[in-house]
Amino acid sequence: MHEGSDPNRVEHAAAPEDPTPTSAPHGADTAVADPPVAPGEVDDAPAGDVAADGAEAPLLPEPQVEAHARAKERGAYYATTPIFYVNAAPHIGHAYTTILVDVVTRFHRLRGDDTFFLTGTDEHGENVQKAAESHGKTPQEYADDVAGQFRSTWDRLGIRYDEFIRTTEERHKRVVRAVLQKVYDAGDIIYGEYAGLYCVRCERYYTEKELVDGKCPQHEIEPEYRTEANYFFRMEKYRTWLRDLLHEQPDLIRPERYRNEVLAMLREPIGDLSISRPRARVPWGIPLPWDEEHVTYVWFDALLNYWSALVSRDAEERYWPHVEHFIAKDILKPHGLFWPIMLKAAGIPIYQHLNVHGYWLIDDRKMSKSLGNVVRPLDLQKKYGNDAFRYFLVRDMNFGLDASFTEPAIAERINSDLANDLGNLLNRTLGMLGRYRDGVVPAPGPLEPIDEGLKDAFLALPDTFARQFDALQFDRAIENVMEAVRKANKYIADTKPWELAKDEADAQRLDTVLHTLVEALRCASILLDPVIPAKAHELRKQLGIKNAPYDLASASEWGLIPPGTQTQPGEPLFPRIDLEALAQQIEDEARAAEEAALAAERAAAEPEPLEHKPEITIHDFAKTELRVVTVEAAERHPNADKLLVLTVRMGPETRTVVSGIQQHYAPDDLVGKKLVLVTNLQPVTIRGVESQGMILAAEDDDGQLSLVTLDRDLADASEVR
């Protein structure tokens, strides 16, 4: 430690870091919602499904009902998605996490819990700054645009979040600075230097053993070697504490395989975590409260959104003890390792569970913007509708494992489950009611064993459904409901209502069968409501039960549809998809995409003619004086981020030159270089510094810059001809 230095300053190696979450709301003026209402109240109406042209259908009001007598005692539930990084528009990976949390929170509202759903965007960092520059925007303008895309996408997908937080909001920044100061004052943040292999897209350092064939495992590019002085969070001192906690609470991270991954990380020293970047290099961030020359980097900014959203609405006590994080496995390390240690150091209680899901794969590869295999959720929404898309995502992924995505798989799932099973049951039931009872639900007679069997199958579902949702077995919970729906279809085949309708003596028996089918559909609509909210609402509407309770408790009861209820048959809930036509469409689209790619390659191979400036004569060129100079000193311009101030020697003369090359060359790398200077330009003052000439450089179409140098040593002031 040097005399007069920061008492927390040390020199050490840094811990490797994980990528910024590509997994993340409305702007700073976001209104705080009132407490979520109970299911069945008007505000609990499902978001409208989306028409084929992508326009959102009008919202349908849910029936107003009285609180059900046997509803479970109201608990609390707080669920979060990651906040998604604003480096690209939303894709199906983002959509899966967000739709899943929407499904889960809708279930908890159905159960009667006081539920809060948080999502948002992560908007600081070097990549956002570069992306903004490439789009000709300020970082805030760029973040506003992409955050707006996320929010618009979630709104169009019918996501019912309670809060959308952005890390550029002042309410979030205040909490971040307060937590940082608390941890710093406790001695858990220190200053030091480190060097390592840095992936510019992840904005993180990797160890060599974390690389795959020498490349970043996320982006498949080679990292660059960087050396930097930053602030570090003393993470290593908490390693034993976290290891013991994971043994004491084995379900803290779920499924178990991901807990085991974190325990494996904790078997070796985890080092200290770099939590800042120099403001001179990355100005787009939250300045550290004790050192304005550094901004906080990623983790103490992004992760704290889960806490800051509650602090800003004074709801920590109400919701934080019940927090459930949902993430993809690529951000397990920051959420399973960094985050609990950060919470411990800040004196904030640890989350209830970290719930980790796998990837959606295309051709056995994770979807990624850099790999060019991204699927846009709104494209699928326009084609299949919100509810069918939601159903496929939740039904076809076993939570925690990877799943393969193909468009034919969506169509096959829609046809088999939603059209053939659920839709067919509704259509057959309404059709028979229309033919035999003028569309009116009849009063049932005595139940026979076959009726009792179907009734028992449906009444057993709510408890099983709730246990499976609590255990993250969402696909199994849905399949159990659909299995009961298939039993109801078989019940029709076994009871043969069309035969009963032929004999007036069987009228009461027919009434019982029809009433049993209507009750089965009612129960199915309640349990499937979190997954297909708009279609479940439409199903109940067609059954004519606008005033029937539909909370979870009511799915455990039978006979809640009053006899005499008039049904209202409508369009099929889920029209069947022509699989052959779809296959042809996909083939045609693939062929068109391939032809477009080939055309683009041909266009790239045939570059456009160069545009030249007006011709000059040899006498005009002779007026320009070019000479060799040696760089004696170089420093950053005191008033500009992109400029360097060079001191160059030209024989007996010394000149000062201001050049816009700071983003391409470090000052120390230029000292001693021989360059070519235009010496007879009229001096000009640039940001307060006089520039006496211009350094020659070449620049390509991608903005890469290279200084003009010599291929052999010549004396200063040698003339360039």
Image (cartoon, grey):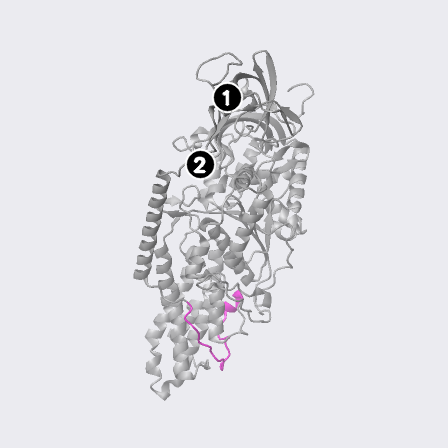
Q: Main secondary structure of the magenta part?
A: loop
Give the foreground label among 2 and 1.
Answer: 1
Amino acid under disc 2: Glu
Q: Nearer the viewer, residue 179 or 50?
A: 50
Q: Secondary structure at mark 2?
A: loop
Q: Is residue 555 magenta?
A: yes
Q: Is residue 139 left or right of residue 181?
A: left
Q: Secondary structure at mark 1?
A: helix
The vertical placement of 195 against 327, above or below, is above
Check disc 2: other Cα within 10 Å, few if <14, some if 14-19, many if 20+: few
**Residue 119 picture location, percent across and down:** 56, 51
Q: Which residue is mark 1?
A: 622
Quarter of the image that includes the N terminus: top right
Q: Which region shows up in magenta?
A: 551-573
**Residue 271 picture location, percent across and down:** 54, 30
**Residue 322 picture location, percent across and down:** 59, 51
**Residue 260 picture location, percent across and down:** 46, 40
Amino acid under disc 1: Ala
Q: Nearer the viewer, residue 45 or 449?
A: 45
Q: CA distance from mark 2 to mark 1?
A: 23 Å
Q: Which residue is mark 2?
A: 611
Residue 611 shows in this picture: yes
Q: Is residue 684 magenta?
A: no
Tags 2 and 1 in contact by the CB under 8 Å rule?
no
Q: Is residue 36 left or right of residue 599?
A: right
Q: Residue at x 43, y 31 (%)?
A: 222
In primary-sequence order, the first of circles 2 and 1 is 2
